[in-house]
Amino acid sequence: MTDSVLEVIVPYGEGRVVPVDSGQQVRITNVNGQQIADTWVFCRDDVGEYQSAEHTRVHVNSLMPQLGEEFVTNHRRAILRLDSDSCRGAHDMLIAACDPTRYQLLGAAPGHRSCQENLRNAMSVVGHPLVDVPQPINLFMNTPVLPDGIVHWLKPAAQPGDAATFTCLLDVYLVVSACPQDIVSINVPGDIRIEVGASSSFTGISDRDPDSVVT
Ligand SMILES: [Zn+2]
């Protein structure tokens, strides 16, 4: 495809919203390989409908969709399809977004940024400052669940330039927060790049060779 691609950089610690139409493809790239990207997807015609982690787990019978599988909304409609993933599934969809109380409990100075506030600030730009804060798709967050049920908190397994690519299946607002977590040692500050293009814009041309991923 030669259609133009919209590129948005999400600076470390900040959030951005991007409207994406049904059928368009989105690529989310980890520029430094170690930055967690909290990601939400809301329906544009009713922001009370959004990608729902708990409904998606039922839909795919797994903690995270595999390649070609769909994320669904809290109304059980398909909203997003995972097209490619050079990070080979080293993502999280269990851990809540960071918020001011989380940082207070961690002993951070008052005013520490958070993904919850980044989400609401981003959605206020498109007229929806009071949206729910659903469980995010925590791209590149490496917190596997061990066989005994314990969550293992690790640094991202991604490498610089690793990316996940999705096709949107509804008209949505996509929000990405480059998580400002700098107290729990699971995140290294960096930027996240969002690209939006026509169908198949990023298919087969861009992801790093998954065989070279160090896990
Ligand atoms: Zn966060």
Image: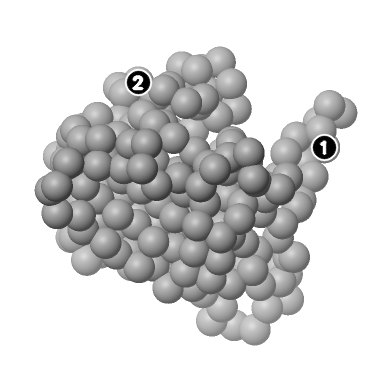
The residue identified by callout 2 is: 76
The residue identified by callout 1 is: 150
Q: State the SS at label 1.
A: loop
Residue at 30% across, 22% down: 77
Residue at 25% across, 35% down: 200
Q: Amino acid at mark 2?
A: Arg
Mark 1 surroundings: few (<14), some (14-19) or many (≥20) residues within 10 A: few
N-term mark: 2 or 1:
2
Q: Nearer the viewer, residue 211 or 200?
A: 211
Above or below, 62 relative to 136: above
Q: Amino acid at mark 1?
A: Ile
| Relative side of 98 to 202, left or right | right
Task: Kindly indicate whether the residue at mark 1 contacts the one at mark 2 (C-beta within 8 angstroms).
Answer: no
Its colouring scheme is one colour
Above or below, 58 relative to 201: above
Mark 2 surroundings: few (<14), some (14-19) or many (≥20) residues within 10 A: some
Residue at 21% across, 47% down: 197
Residue at 63% across, 39% down: 211
Residue 41 visible in the picture? no
| Relative side of 189 to 206, left or right | right
Above or below, 168 relative to 39: above
Quarter of the view holding residue 102: bottom right
Question: Which quadrant is home to the C terminus?
Answer: top right
| Relative side of 163 to 25, left or right | right
Q: State the SS at label 2.
A: loop
Q: Nearer the viewer, residue 183 or 67?
A: 67
